[in-house]
Amino acid sequence: MRSERAGLGLRIAAAGGLLYLHLPIAFILLYAFTTEDKSYQFPPPGLTLKWFAVAWNRQDIWDALWLSVEVALVATALAILLGTLAAAALWRARFFGRDAITLLIVLPIALPGIITGIALRSTFGLLDIPFSFWTIVTGHATFCIVVVYNNAIARLRRTSPSLLEAAMDLGADGFQTFRWVLLPNLATALLAGGMLAFALSFDEVIVTTFTAGQQTTLPIWMLSELVRPRQRPVTNVVAVFVIAVTFLPILLAYRLTRGTESMHGTGK
Amino acid sequence: MEGAVTVGVAAPSPSIRGRRAAMAEPAVRFLGVHRHFGEVRAVDGVDLEIAPGEFFSMLGPSGSGKTTCLRLIAGFEEPDAGEIHLLGRPMRGVPPYERRVNTVFQDYALFPHMNVLDNVGFGLRVKRVPRAERIRKAEAALALVKLAGLEDRRPAQLSGGQRQRVALARALVNEPEVLLLDEPLGALDLKLRQEMQSELKGLQRELGITFVYVTHDQEEALGMSDRVAVFNRGRIEQIGTPPEIYEHPRTAFVAGFVGISNIVDAEAAVRFTGERRPFSLRPERILLDPPAGAVDIETRGRITDIQYHGASTRLRLVLSDGLELVVERPNTEGTDGALAPGREIRLGWRRDAMRPLRETGR
């Protein structure tokens, strides 16, 4: 019989892989508490909570944070609306070019952010559109829509088309069918997609760099802090915060879609 | 409780019955209806009339157009040509939600995010029936299909048979003029199916609603229906009562699809009928070793195969001229050991057992 335990080599490799993935994050956490503010020396000479207080009192951090939150919220809302509509349109329709359109919708997330960024920047330049809150939102919406679309279309594919016919058969017009049958069926998928979209938008750097102009979102602020070091551990404090803000929605989204799988999976 | 149930759910009031009788309009009428999907003529010129209160079955193999006809009545499809009338009203352009018909879907199509009570009450909710009345009617409908007590369950927590009943209650609670059933028993096992057949028939008699029942199962159609339409390639081959369909099939297709039949072609028929016209001869109408005077036509054949079916035995015989016949022999006196493959035997049938068929090939 083969042993149930993996071989020693494999276990070391797995542990090494996990360390490689998560050790840097652990260091970010650690240096949020260091007493030394010029360079990262190991081990930290001492631990303190004062950088949390410093970060709390920095107006530039708050400004960047609010901009990021607002952008993420608006981009997510836009993505839920457009992503759902796109999914609904491509779910049952059979028309020439359908596969091409599906590809076009999904492409922005496969495309390197730098391509999306340059493309948007030159488009804004050509059309003489000044950088604003809305140019950032537009940039983020390109990939947020994909996340929502993917979640929505996956749920729709598991939904029997006769469900909508049944609603109509029972007297529901188009809007009532949408409101009482289609939307509740999609709800958890949209919530999950929305949270993923929010997380993606909240920590986006590359596309933002090309579409933000002089505005500073939180990730951009962090990038600039690294270049010009000033109270270095403050950046780590913000990083800890970003980890929390993006990790929780993703975890929640995962749990949400997993929990409903069994229920929607039983078609008959 | 029984009385309350029938009042609460879908029993047509005397005035409705009266109106129906006075108008004498068929519940459903097809006038030269066509529905094509690209090159496929799913429905290829169908005319029919279904009387109010009738249990009407559409029987045919898959792809014969029966389900499309049902969807045309429900309004999920519009005819490319021809007209459909429901109780005398032309239905062209009327969306499904404005037709007084309800459907029991093949896959039940229960709303997975609602419990049983909300599923059944859905039609009333859309019509803005007050909550208390909605619940009362939904509960009555559930009692009617013997599901009282399962109101809070989700569809995923029900068995196939229970889901079927919820789908039925959800349709019946709206008191439709016509109830459309799309192979509703197809997914159930044999025993449950037979149970539901008699229950459905009982419900239909009790409520007096017109049932239009789509099935590919000829036994189901014969056993439940007032009349049956046999579909083949988008057309109706024959409409009639179950005995008419079974005993007087007009085409080889009907004779072969509904039950088993010996279809004797025009050439071979001359010898028995003196006419060059094919006929159908049901296996149970052929007698082996017939007593004198019991049959009009007598011949001899050799047994080639014997299949024991419990209540009856099915034999395959070949006549001296090469004609093959299937014979169904009831095992009323136990099995007959004398029957064995290779044995020569006398057989015969009465003249009226031979049912002339319309020349095939249209």
Image (spheres, coloured by chain):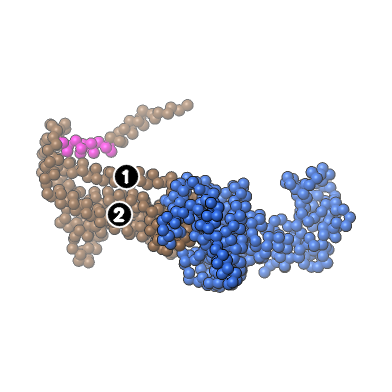
Q: Is residue A119 above or below residue B117?
A: below
Chain B drawing hue: blue
Q: Is residue A264 above or below residue B250?
A: above
Chain rendered brown? A
The chain containing the residue under callout 1 comes to A
Disc 2 designates what residue? Answer: A144
**Relative to the observer, which residue lies in front, B81 or A149?**
B81
Q: Earlier in the sequence, mark 1 or mark 2?
A: 2
Circle 1 — which element?
helix
Whether B241 is among the magenta residues is no
Residue pictured at 85% horizontal, 60% vertical: B296
Give the magenta-colored segment's residue range: A20-33
Residue pictured at 19% horizontal, 35% vertical: A30
The chain containing the residue under callout 2 comes to A
Q: Residue furthest right?
A: B292
Q: Position of residue A63 (x, y in %)?
A: 15, 51
Q: Position of residue B120 (x, y in %)?
A: 47, 54
Asked where in the image residue B271 lies, by quadrant, the reply is bottom right
Q: Amino acid at mark 1?
A: Leu
Q: Amino acid at mark 2?
A: Cys
Disc 1 designates what residue? Answer: A252
Please count the marks in the image.
Answer: 2
Whether A25 is among the magenta residues is yes
Residue pictured at 40% horizontal, 28% vertical: A5
The Cα atoms of the two marked residues, 1 and 2, are separated by 17 Å
